[in-house]
Amino acid sequence: MGIQPTSQAISSTNKLVEESYDKIASQYLDWTLSTPSPRLSYLSLFLKELPSPSSAKVLELGCGAGVPGTQFLAKSCAHVTGVDISFAQIALANQHVKSTYSNTEFIQSDMLALDMEQGSFDAVVGLYSILHLTRSDQVVAMELIRGLLKPGGVFVGNFSLEGTAKTGTWIGGEKMFWAGWEKEDWLGKLEEGGFEVLKADVVVDVEDRREVRFLWIVAKIKS
């Protein structure tokens, strides 16, 4: 596809993310369902930007177990393809979502290693997923997303506003990697990358009694 991830990311941070999510997949699903998040609100806003959700092909990067995000999308969209780096997450997605929604499919893959036809999706979703890439690979991911979207295609995602890259301890004591920039840095990169930002909100999530800032973006390909 002409867009390649860095070899360092494949061998280290992405592998760490994959192995950790394989270990905590069930715990993470429970945590997701019990931790307040604006994800469904932003997915609703995102769907309103689609000319025809009922005929839309959607790609979800970092779908996890498919609950509640993929389920929500599958109710309104023609087809949803969920991708996750974790085999255990994909197994849960097939169990919880594919068994009920025939208009879904799930692929276990590093999002940067996808080999898909350019311009094949009406929309791309990346919630709590792109932020697990190194900062340089987050830029690569947005280039990949832009290439996969049809003209006028829509993107919704959230990004860490920590402004750093770090490895820390997370659910179940497993290590996890996160990285991000500040809001203005991200807005500049999206603009340079060919996106028109329709909505950009800084939202504070409370995770395990700790406040975490995220930048929530709804954008479309510039016409």
Image (cartoon, rainbow, N blue to C red):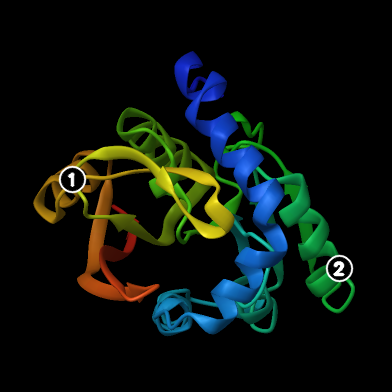
Residue 163 has which mark? Answer: 1
Q: Which residue is mark 2?
A: 95
Q: As displayed, is residue 176 above or below residue 36?
A: above
* Left or right of residue 85: residue 158: left
The reply to whether residue 6 is visible in this rendering is no
Closer to us: 127 or 46: 127
Total labels: the figure holds 2
Which amino acid is tagged 2?
A: Gln
How many other residues sit within 10 Å of disc 1, few (<14), some (14-19) or many (≥20)? some
Residue 15, by quadrant, is top right
| Residue 74 pos. (x, y %) | 69, 76
Residue 111, by quadrant, is top right
| Residue 220 pos. (x, y %) | 34, 59
Q: CA distance from mark 1 to mark 2?
A: 36 Å
**Residue occupying image coordinates x 61% and y 65%:** 28
Secondary structure category for the residue under label 2:
helix
Q: As displayed, is residue 38 above or below residue 189?
A: below
* The N terminus: image quadrant: top right
Which amino acid is tagged 1?
A: Gly
Q: As displayed, is residue 186 above or below residue 58?
A: above
